[in-house]
Image (cartoon, rainbow, N blue to C red):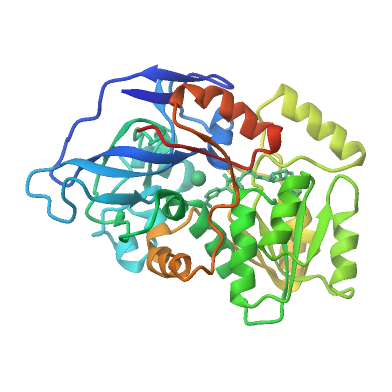
Amino acid sequence: MKALCWHGRNDIRCDTVPDPQIEDSRDVIIKVTSCAICGSDLHLMDGLMPTMESGDVLGHEFMGEVVEVGQGFTKFKKGDRIVVPFNINCGECRQCKLGNWSVCQRSNRNAEMAAAMFGYTTAGLFGYSHLTGGYAGGQAEYVRVPMADVAPMKVPDGMDDESALFLTDILPTGWQGAEHCEIQGGETIAIWGAGPVGFFAIQSAKLMGAERIIAIDTVPERLELARKAGATDIIDFEKEDVFERIKEISRGEGADAVIDCVGMEATAGHGIAGVVSAIQEKLTATERPYVLTEAIKAVRPCGIVSIPGVYGGPLPINMGSVVQKGLTLKSGQTHVKRYLETLTELIQQGKLDVTSLITHRSTNLADGPDLYKTFRDKKDGCVKVVFHPN
Ligand code: NAD
Ligand code: ZN
């Protein structure tokens, strides 16, 4: 079959690889009908996530039709259309029972590697390095879905692929990012990054009752989407002083909660920091915590800093500001399964716009290497790339 494979920094290829096989009675194999490139995949492309190996199949946002099931498997049958959350869940460990799906204790085949890095293991993820289990991803024609009896969900009748696809990751990620802000109604929420995750965080904050939603980015079409999603205020970080603008909008008090929907590959705005960040981007693969630093500064005392943006290792942040202002930091890979039912209903009720971010579609995975670059460089108005490989 064809699949998009990682071969090193900035080296993604469309390879022919062996078809996946059933390995366990809890497995299913799906024929992928839709899959997408995520901002998280850019961290792999740009060489910021350790433990990738040449030939690894990428992709953690995918859905498709069940074509094979393990022996005695009953949750799905051949022909069912399913969405597959990016985290793999055993359903039996203490964390799964608590609903902390992204830190499942048993699905990561390289649990020791993850524990050495983070203290304890986190869940197995599709197509996301050997640190998260080394599972083949879904930017492919077929995928083996292990522990398929737990996280994956049958697509409701009548729901098309593009309405369901983002349930696998970015929609629940934006939702969790907003939920972490504990919105009661009337708050000012500042959101860095108007990419796909920011787009859904804005919609979620609005549905939860935020009054002012400040979107920060610099890419015009992304800021336009942010406005469409419900942002009441827009800040272009290349042109304006983000901290000062947030202060002004929040009547001098600071945002009640802030959401970092950018993560480790932030670019610094203007001034000397901007120059340094541009050099860092070109020459080295280092994490750049510009947004997190700014978010910690811009939130009001006793506010909440929600961090869906992905980071990989130790970073210099202003702990003084966290402690002295009494901030609460909330983060994590998304517990996708926790939100599937609620979000499916909201989609069916027409309360979420799940399609206007899709700017690029392809039926040919061979377009993958080019589309990865288009997405990373935000060329051609690209916000989200979706493949329909079968
Ligand atoms: P993306 O790369 O498309 O979007 C990032 C946006 O941030 C871009 O529009 C960029 O212009 C903007 N940006 C860069 N520097 C900025 C700055 N200084 N201020 C404001 N905006 C800035 O990515 P995405 O798909 O939207 O994902 C965003 C982040 O969320 C990534 O780190 C990704 O890994 C992470 N993510 C996390 C989870 C999770 O489970 N926690 C799931 C999916 C994605
Ligand atoms: Zn993703």
Quadrant of residue 144 in the image?
top left
| Quarter of the image with the C terminus in it | top left
Residue 296 in the image: above or below residue 380 = below
Q: Is residue 317 left or right of residue 142?
A: right
Q: What residue do we see at 52% from left, 38% from top?
A: 37
Residues 248 and 370: in front is 370
Q: Is residue 276 left or right of residue 139?
A: right
In the rendering, at what x and y percent does residue 302 appear? 72, 74
Quadrant of residue 285 in the image?
top right
Q: What residue do we see at 32% from left, 20% from top?
A: 17
Residue 311 in the image: above or below residue 167 = above
| Quarter of the image with the N terminus in it | top left
The reply to whether residue 172 is visible in this rendering is yes
Q: What residue do we see at 65% from left, 63% from top?
A: 202
Residue 230 in the image: above or below residue 291 = below
Query: So how many labels did they put on this image?
Result: 0
In the rendering, at what x and y percent does residue 348 appear? 43, 67
Considering every residue shown, the one lying at the far front of the view is 158
In the rendering, at what x and y percent does residue 276 appear? 83, 32
The reply to whether residue 47 is visible in this rendering is no
Residues 289 and 269: in front is 269
Q: What residue do we see at 88% from left, 62% from top?
A: 245
